[in-house]
Image: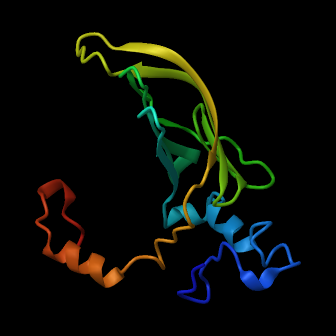
Amino acid sequence: MHCKAEEKIRSVRPQGHGRPVQAGFPPPHLEKELESPCPESHLQEAADEVLFYGVNSKSECLLVRIAARVCNQMADAWIYLKMADGKTYNLAETMGYQQSSDDKNQVFSCGKLQMHYLSPMRRWRIFYCGMLKDISGHKEDHEESVFVKFVFVWKASSEIYDCTLDTNPEGFADAIARSEWKVPFVPPIK
């Protein structure tokens, strides 16, 4: 149980016996707000993205990400999939249109990749049906694309992590100030 600030998300509250929302089931409204895609008006001044990364016991790895863009309902997607046999795949075409959101505003999409929460901060459905580039052969002259379809129900196996409250901003600021910046990554400091 966490209690760092009044707005902190709490996964379980012991005093919630007999009261489903206070006990953490169903999720509080704040969690739904934080996990839902931002409206178009918000994207004029800020970014919106969702990212999942996981590894199973066979060392198979999956990274999926969707970042919403401001103009014309465009989004940027990443898919990186590494199988137990060593084959590695990634998404060749990363830019795509976001599909119209459902009435519940739960869906992140980019092209043929869709992600939506079933239970905020606990369970997500990740769906993709399309072509991925095989990058395991190291053949620069010939890229092979394969058809891939997957559907995952992603379950959180850790406590809820809120980067705005679970991190030390002074520590990050100090680390950024001490780092040596290379030309393409120099922050816009005045």
The reply to whether residue 68 is visible in this rendering is no
Residue 169 appears left or right of 3: left
The outermost residue toward the bottom is 6
Quarter holding residue 136:
top left
Residue 26 appears left or right of 47: right
Q: Where is residue 75 in the image (x, y as percent from the top left)?
A: 52, 44
Q: Where is residue 123 in the image (x, y as percent from the top left)?
A: 67, 52
Question: Which of these two is toward me, 69 or 103?
Answer: 103
Residue 98 appears left or right of 88: right
Question: Which of these two is toward me, 75 or 130?
Answer: 130
Q: Quadrant of the C terminus?
A: bottom left
Identified at 14% across, 69% down, the residue is: 179
Identified at 43% across, 15% down, the residue is: 145
Q: Position of residue 39 (x, y in %)?
A: 65, 61
Q: Where is residue 72 in the image (x, y as percent from the top left)?
A: 56, 46
Number of numbered discs overlaid on the protein picture: 0
The reply to whether residue 103 is visible in this rendering is yes
Q: In which quarter of the image is the N terminus?
A: bottom right
Task: Please say if 177 is above or below 80.
Answer: below
Quarter holding residue 176:
bottom left
Quarter holding residue 112:
top right
Q: How is the image coloured?
A: rainbow
Identified at 62% across, 76% down, the residue is: 9
The outermost residue toward the right is 18
Task: Please say if 100 is above or below 31.
Answer: above
